[in-house]
Amino acid sequence: MAVERDVRLAGRRFPLLAGLLILGSLWLFLGVLEDVATNDPLVDFDLTVQQTLQKLRTPLLDGVMVALTALGGVEVVLPLVIAALAWFVWHRLWRTSLYWLLAAGIAELLVKVLKWLLHRPRPASLYQGLEMYSFPSGHATVAVVVYGFLAFLVCRGKVAAVQWRVGLMTGAMLLAIGFSRLYLGVHWFSDVIAGMSLGLAWAGALAIAYSYGAPEDVRPLPLSLSLWLMLVLLLAWSWHAGITLIDR
């Protein structure tokens, strides 16, 4: 009974918390966007952060940050998206499959459009095409949406203690990915903040819409999905991070 009560209370609080998250994230994203577009003092702070972190670099930390940044790369995120989609389709969760595709697909589209519109150069020229532009950080945006929305799906119907643990672990991983982009000198501070806030707003909007949907979504997703996705994530990450470190 206590577990059921905790779940009901969490369900009643969720719309308010998600709504505040969306509004706060949009406010932050638009504020950063305005500062970048008008060359406000935040741009000077970007340069200070970038110069400070580059002075702290060491070969050991470089390797750690390369491994961390791989968690937000397409080589790791894409297999995770495909693995989750395959599980949803196998269990005929059609609406969940649609939301999952919208989460990742629109996040990637928003990043591409903003990069094309703003044409903001990266701190270091390591990329070609649209990827040579830095605002917003694609790693930060897509990682927040994919890992964040996945954490939401896995936590549905779980007690508050489980939700907090999953949320804290997911948040720590996302912060590590964002910091790795700054440390490696491939993004400005405002790129990462904008990417994370945009990702939070989109993931929050999807979570609210998903919560008021079809009956297929009522039951919490089972442990088997979490184990399957953790296996895929570890394999993709180990392979990609290992190859990247060898290339260095």
Image (cartoon, grey):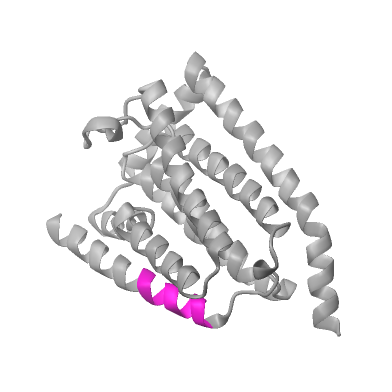
138 to 135, vertically: above or below = below
Query: In which image quadrant can residue 121 be found?
Result: top left
Query: In which image quadrant can residue 198 be found?
Result: top right
Q: How many marks?
A: 0
Report the magenta stretch's main SS: helix
Q: Quadrant of the N terminus?
A: bottom right
Q: Position of residue 211 (x, y in %)?
A: 70, 58
At x 79%, y 64%, the residue is 11
At x 62%, y 33%, the residue is 28
At x 74%, y 71%, the residue is 160
At x 60%, y 26%, the residue is 31
Q: Which of the two residues, 70 or 110, is positioned nearer the viewer here?
A: 110
Q: Position of residue 77 (x, y in %)?
A: 38, 58
- Reply yes or no: does residue 164 show up in magenta: no
Q: Position of residue 161 (x, y in %)?
A: 71, 74
Give the extent of the magenta segment.
224-233
Q: Quadrant of the C terminus?
A: bottom left
Taking the view exactly as shown, the residue that stands out farthest to the bottom is 1
- Reply yes or no: does residue 229 show up in magenta: yes
Q: Position of residue 156 (x, y in %)?
A: 67, 69
103 to 236, vertically: above or below = above
35 to 185, vertically: above or below = above
Q: Is residue 171 visible to us here? A: no
Taking the view exactly as shown, the residue that stands out farthest to the top is 38
Q: Is residue 31 visible to us here? A: yes
